[in-house]
Amino acid sequence: MDPRTPVPRLVLDPDLPPGVARILRTSPGTLQAVRAGVVPPPTGPRPVIVITVTFFLLVALMLAGPWGMFTLGAVVTGLGGLQALAGDPKERDARRRLRVAIEHADRFVLPGDLDAGCRDLLARAQNAVDDVLGSQVDGAGLLDAIDNSVTLPAEIWRLGVRLADLTRIRAQHDQIVPQDVPADIAEVFAPYDEVLDRARRSLAARVTTLEEYAREVRRADAVYRAYRQLGVLRERTPDYERLLAETAEDLLAIPHIDRLSGQAQEVERVFHSSIDEARRAGSHLLSLTAA
């Protein structure tokens, strides 16, 4: 694989209970096994054990009466419980994880559920969301156009589901449509091909919108850092004024000091402008998500 190719990650339904999400997120091999069709082993006793216990209970009933059968049954039940408790904890945990993954098989999307083109789109979207959620301006609450911590994971989930659906339908399409279609009837299949292409272009446009939002946020982040550094310099402005006054005539120093103040105001203006641009990009993303 080309190391420059973005690699997508597991996508989980953000509405999953936290405990279930934690199990799925920490069980990559189990999730792949579920996709491969693995089923959990039966949890009940094996038939041969049931037959054997039943036989001994009947014998106890004939030889010792109901109380003897009851006593034997209690002993067998207790031994069975002890055996279950003494079983391999790793095996019990593996079975539990497998059951949880099977019960929620429609609540996660694996990279293996997607074809190459869809994997690339998902990875790009995830990278864009990482940039937004990891930004300083988002952490400072300056991007109040949307609740990124809620809206962006939900958008990734919707994208993942649609990309997986597109991959599945495209694979079925490739199996149905013959590779050696005669030229004179190829146009019959064209409308179906066009639907697949339009679906992919639509999803690619959503990813591009996410990337544009992330790009505006990165710019706002850079300006925000400069803005904060400017705040530190503002506190030290008297030192600069003193140095300037000591090295130049007052009449020459005053315009220079005014220019320092004007430059500070310009940085502040650019900062607020960049935040507004990021908010507008977020609002546009929100309008697409609601559509």
Image: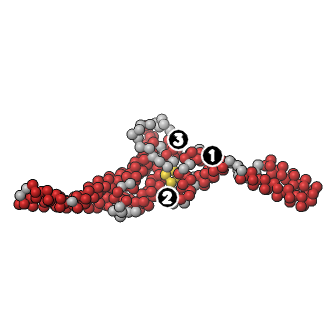
Above or below, 4 against 103 in this view is above
Give the class, few, some or many, for how many residues have Cα within 10 Å of label 2's Cα (few <14, many ≥20): some
**Residue 125 screen position, x and y as percent:** 41, 50
Q: Which mark is residue 14?
A: 2
What residue is shown at x 47% (from left), y 52% (from top)?
160
Amino acid under disc 2: Pro
- Count of marks placed on residues: 3
Residue 287 shows up from this direction: no
Amino acid type, mark 1: Val
| Front label number (2 vs 3) | 2
| Residue 106 image offset from top left, x and y in percent | 55, 54
Q: CA distance from mark 1 to mark 3?
A: 25 Å
Between marks 2 and 3, how big is the CA–CA gap?
33 Å
**Percent from the top left, x then y, of residue 120?**
42, 45
The mark closer to the camera, 1 or 3, is 1
Furthest-right residue in this view? 63
- Amino acid found under the numbered disc labelled 3: Gln
Name the residue at 25% across, 59% down. Answer: 232
Quadrant of image for the C terminus: bottom left
Name the secondary structure under disc 3: helix
Label 1 or label 2, whichever comes before in sequence order: 2
Q: Residues within 10 Å of mark 1 (few under 14, many from 20)?
A: few
Regarding mark 1 in the picture, which secondary structure is present there? Answer: loop
Q: Report the Cα–Cα distance between label 1 and label 2.
A: 25 Å
Vertical side of 145 occupied by 128: above or below = above
Residue receiving disc 1: 38
What residue occupies the far bottom of the structure in this picture? 144
In this rendering, the answer to whether 254 lies above or below 24 is below
**Mark carried by residue 175:** 3
Q: Residue furthest front?
A: 246
